[in-house]
Image (tube, rainbow, N blue to C red):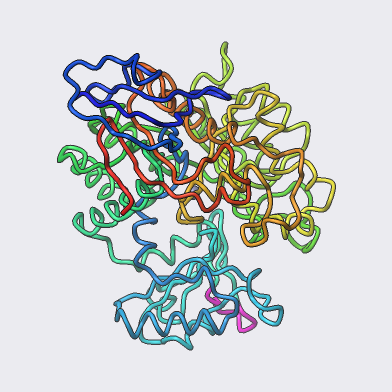
């Protein structure tokens, strides 16, 4: 199959564009002016009428299965009061009649001031005491169950869960709030999905992802108890040619015993081609979220001195599992938001290096609260930084009060990290945020709120340029997977993964970047999405 795409503004590199490109069997062969391209036996010429074309975007960390689930679950992201959460739950129950009610996306910081608290089982019991309910906070690090859900878990000792908490009310009984590793106790009541249902979740997630311009995802779907079914479903879909985009595995094992088992089984038995389905990284959590004050800080929270966060893994556990992964040639990415979590991850990674600096490209997911010294060390050690600028939309309102002005002034320091040499790539952590890359690029470039583009900017000097943000989302994310030599650029020899935009991202006002729509997505030389 030979295709020419012509009459475009095709992004090659900073200040470098081409008008046309020639694709043969999924690979870009030539770029340049239409007249100069090989015109023999062309099957198809696509005229993109002057529109801007970018390499397909690559989300370096999201959760495709959860994204697919989220599209069908009770969406709480817009709730501005506890009452609204309750009403949304009731409406969902009336219209869907689920056996178990699952909702996601509430955030107490978006509630009216009189409701400035997390929801509890008492709130959810107003929706139902018959049907089990699990409503997760937007960050996914806190989940709340109603009385029925708690009864179904059958908790004996509620005082302690390794790396998480089951909060108790004044009556000494669980108040419904589960944090960090304890959320898995709550999830244990969700019936395991059949392969068919998982397939439809994955398909729904993929369809949405390609419609917003993603051609590759690095997706963490293998988590805890579901791992075998997810693994076999993904591999079956791959064999049946049903993976619509390029999928890199990220697999989460907090427990070293489970990780050892994985190394002996799935990791070895999977079929990979490194182009459409690749092995990817071990994903770890070192801490929680800033919003929930579970991010691990070196000092107590400025706005709650009773806590400095939660360590989901101790320093020793992290050290041991990082060294085991490295010994097995597996790259590691670790969720670290607070400065103490970042510190622990830098040290654990450094302990795995011998002659070469970061040969497996270990990375820090989020890397939000940092000191200047940590920024220097991350860059020197070439630790990959997997950033979510869109998190600033909410976090810019709380970061100073949570960590104090001094530490806030060196946090979310994506430009400093990039300029000092850290490999930077971008992600949305969907469904934590929508996986649409354009609001994310907008946040990277403006560091202003989505709703108020003329409002305050969080650390002007940490803005990325449009080109830097695009490069981080394409070749930067590909670097993370050791694939920068064949994807993430529109150059001869690279795969024809590309997107066409309805507006020129390089010349429009930055405030409009968040509204950009994708008109065409091509993966491996085939059109997989076109807007109507
Ligand atoms: Zn995540």
Q: Say which of 24 and 270 sits in front.
A: 24
- Magenta segment includes 484: no
For residue 189, side relative to residue 173 (left or right): left
In this rendering, would 487 be left or right of 317? Answer: left
- Between 296 and 202, the one nearer to me in the picture: 202
Q: Is residue 324 visible?
A: no
- The magenta segment is 169-176
Query: Residue at horizontal 66%, vertical 39%?
Result: 342
Q: Quadrant of residue 357?
A: top right
Give above or below for 88 relative to 70: below
Image location (x, y in percent) of residue 312: 57, 50
Q: Is residue 184 left or right of residue 276?
A: right
Q: Quadrant location of the N terminus?
A: top left
Q: Does the rendering let one see residue 396?
A: yes
Q: Residue furthest top?
A: 355
**Splitting the image into 4 quarters, where does residue 363 fall?**
top right
Residue 306 falls left or right of residue 27: right
Residue 246 spot, x, y in % from top left: 32, 36
Decide which of 243, 169 is in the foreground and name it.
243
Rendered residue at 64%/22% (across/down) = 381
Residue 344 appears in which quarter of the rendering? top right
């Amino acid at each position: 199959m030979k295709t020419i795409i012509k009459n475009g503004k095709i992004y090659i590199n900073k200040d470098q564009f081409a008008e046309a490109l020639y694709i043969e069997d999924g690979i870009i062969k030539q770029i340049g002016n239409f007249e100069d391209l090989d015109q023999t036996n062309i099957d198809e010429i696509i005229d993109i009428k002057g529109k801007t074309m970018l390499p397909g975007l690559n989300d370096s960390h999201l959760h495709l299965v959860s994204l697919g689930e989220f599209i069908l679950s009770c969406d709480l992201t817009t709730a501005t009061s506890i009452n609204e959460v309750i009403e949304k739950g009731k409406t969902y129950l009336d219209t869907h009649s689920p056996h178990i009610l699952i909702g996601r996306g509430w955030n107490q910081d978006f509630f009216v001031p009189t409701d400035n608290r997390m929801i509890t089982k008492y709130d959810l019991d107003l929706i139902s005491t018959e049907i089990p309910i699990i409503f997760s906070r937007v960050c996914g690090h806190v989940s709340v169950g109603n009385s029925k859900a708690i009864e179904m878990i059958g908790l004996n000792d509620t005082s302690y869960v390794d790396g998480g908490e089951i909060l108790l009310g004044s009556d000494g009984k669980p108040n419904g709030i589960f944090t960090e590793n304890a959320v898995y106790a709550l999830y244990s009541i969700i019936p395991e999905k059949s392969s068919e249902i998982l397939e439809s979740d994955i398909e729904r997630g993929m369809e949405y992802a390609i419609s917003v311009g993603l051609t590759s995802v690095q997706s963490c779907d293998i988590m805890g108890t579901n791992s075998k079914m997810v693994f076999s479903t993904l591999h079956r879909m791959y064999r049946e040619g049903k993976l619509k985009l390029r999928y890199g595995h990220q697999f989460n094992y907090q427990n070293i015993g489970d990780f050892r088992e994985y190394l002996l089984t799935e990791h070895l038995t999977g079929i990979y081609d490194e182009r459409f389905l690749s092995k990817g990284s071990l994903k770890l959590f070192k801490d929680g979220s800033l919003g929930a004050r579970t991010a691990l800080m070196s000092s107590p929270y400025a706005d709650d001195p009773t806590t400095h966060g939660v360590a989901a893994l101790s320093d020793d556990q992290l050290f041991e599992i990082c060294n085991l992964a490295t010994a097995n040639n597996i790259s590691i990415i670790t969720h670290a938001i607070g400065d103490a979590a970042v510190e622990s991850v830098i040290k654990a990674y450094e302990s795995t290096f011998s002659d070469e600096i970061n040969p497996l490209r270990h990375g820090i997911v989020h890397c939000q609260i940092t000191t200047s010294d940590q920024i220097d060390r991350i860059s020197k050690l070439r630790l990959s930084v997997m950033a979510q600028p869109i998190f600033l939309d909410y976090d810019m309102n709380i970061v100073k009060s949570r960590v104090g002005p001094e530490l806030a002034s060196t946090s979310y320091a994506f430009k400093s990290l990039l300029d000092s040499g850290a490999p930077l790539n971008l992600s949305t952590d969907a469904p934590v945020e929508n996986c649409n890359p354009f609001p994310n690029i907008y946040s990277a470039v403006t560091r202003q709120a989505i709703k108020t583009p003329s409002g305050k900017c969080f650390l002007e000097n940490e803005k990325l340029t449009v080109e830097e943000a695009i490069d981080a989302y394409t070749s930067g994310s590909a670097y993370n997977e050791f694939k920068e030599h064949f994807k993430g650029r529109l150059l001869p020899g690279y795969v024809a993964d590309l997107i066409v935009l309805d507006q020129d991202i390089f010349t429009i006002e930055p405030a409009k970047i968040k509204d950009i729509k994708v008109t065409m997505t091509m993966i491996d030389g085939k059109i997989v999405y076109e807007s109507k």
